[in-house]
Image (tube, rainbow, N blue to C red):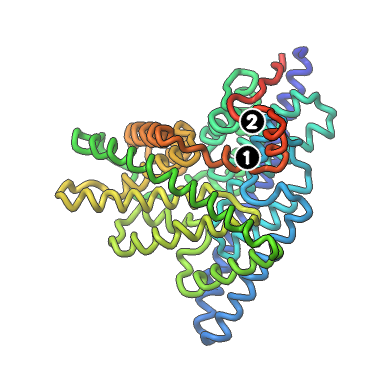
Amino acid sequence: MSLLRTCWFYFVCLIAGVLTGFVGGYFQVFLHRADHLRLYLSAWAHQIGFFEGFCLILLICVGAAVIGRALVRFAPTAGGSGIQYVEAAWRQEVEPARLRVVFVKFIGGLLTLGSGMALGREGPTVQMGAALGATLGRWLKFTPEELRFLTIASAGTGLGVAFSSPLGGSMFTFEEVTKDIRMNLVIPTLICAFAGCTVSMTILGMQPDYHVISRAFALPNFKEAAAYICFGVFMGAMGPLYNKLVLWLLDANKYFSSLLPEVKAALVGVVVAALVYFAPGLSGGGDLLAQQMLNYSFPIMTILAIGLIRWFFAPLCYSTGVPGGLFSPLLLMGGILGQFFIWILNLFGLNLNPMAFCAVGMSAFFASTICAPITGVLLILEMTACWDLTLPMMIASALAFFTSQALKSMPVYTALRLRIPEVKALEEKGVKVLGPAPIPKDLS
């Protein structure tokens, strides 16, 4: 590629980043408003009486679930997280997403996440970024290699935009999606992430995604270091269990093939409505609850109750196939497990900081389930600005990743990619669908 063509490609990466930041930023703005409206409606429903109030919440939650699932019919790849389709597109197993995915993901995500389903905003934002980059590349008649690089750079930017984490989003591109790092991939990704996060932070503000009151943590002493090592192994065992539950519920959903997908989504919408009415703080992606756990030590019975509900509630919502991701519920679960683990250790008089283990638990659980430890560390550091926890996150995430690999746990997005019909068809033909992706030609 000539120097002029390379400069033109990088300029298009800048434009793709701006578009991703704009769409992803306003997606979050509307989601925040939907969250506040849901909490307000839940409080108001209690004032007008149980029957009227619960019926109102039920109508909203079931209606949002049905419409959100029905929209997926217009873009089948928009169901669920969508990250597995981004990975499949990089491997040339499916075509890159079309523009209609953006509309389905944006509107469907607002309905399902806003109504209280335990889903994350990052999956929709990643796939919307990939679709915007791919559409721009198609309009400009890019070569297949250029289109792949632009699509993947925009996808990583989507994660950076979703969590105000440009480094975490960029590393996600290299560590999880492409499992490859080279300058011709690094440069467009960083350019795209710079543009996208600049735009989104202009819309949302420059503050970290989680507001942590006390960010100062001392360097771990021998006692704390040993605790972090044990904690990493514990999280490495919990991640595969969570992944199996997600996949099991997806399989269970297939057993009711006689029911329309919208009907199954409506049934889960009833569960969502019950939670929104009786325990509104436990509904939604879990960002507010995760932030509270980063700042306060919860009683053990509260931790157990929240953990038990969220352990099943998030995978149940994901099994419906409505637009929504896995990251935010994963991070909350990591924080819950962190507080639970430290409560056990403190029974032996260790007097360790629950908030520190909550933050470290988020990165370690991410490493265990997604199998991307560096991304998990960067993501949580940028989201919390708790830079003093860099060393504990590094060791806990590394051991969580090692333990999950020792247990032969497959990364959740790899497992989801293998369920895509096109990938299944390739596997039946004897095409290798695991291992390194085909390496595209360099851009220069």
Query: Foreground: 423 or 168?
Result: 423
Residue 37 lies in quadrant: bottom right
Q: Mark 2: few, some, or many residues within 10 Å (few <14, many ≥20)?
A: some
25 vs 157, nearest the viewer: 157
Quarter of the image for residue 148 reads: top right
Q: CA distance from mark 1 to mark 2?
A: 9 Å
Residue 441 shows in the view = yes
Image vertical order of residue 48 relative to residue 74, above or below: below
Task: Please name the residue that numbered disc 1 is placed on.
Answer: 417
Residue at image location 30% in from the left, 41% down from the top = 231
Expressed as whole percent of the image width and height from the top left, the position of residue 427 reads 67, 33
Q: Is residue 384 visible?
A: no
Q: Amino acid at mark 2?
A: Val
Q: Secondary structure at mark 1?
A: helix
**In the image, is 81 to the left or to the right of 298?**
right
Are the residues flagged by discs 1 and 2 in contact, CB closer than 8 Å? yes
Q: Secondary structure at mark 2?
A: loop
149 w.r.t. 247: above or below: above
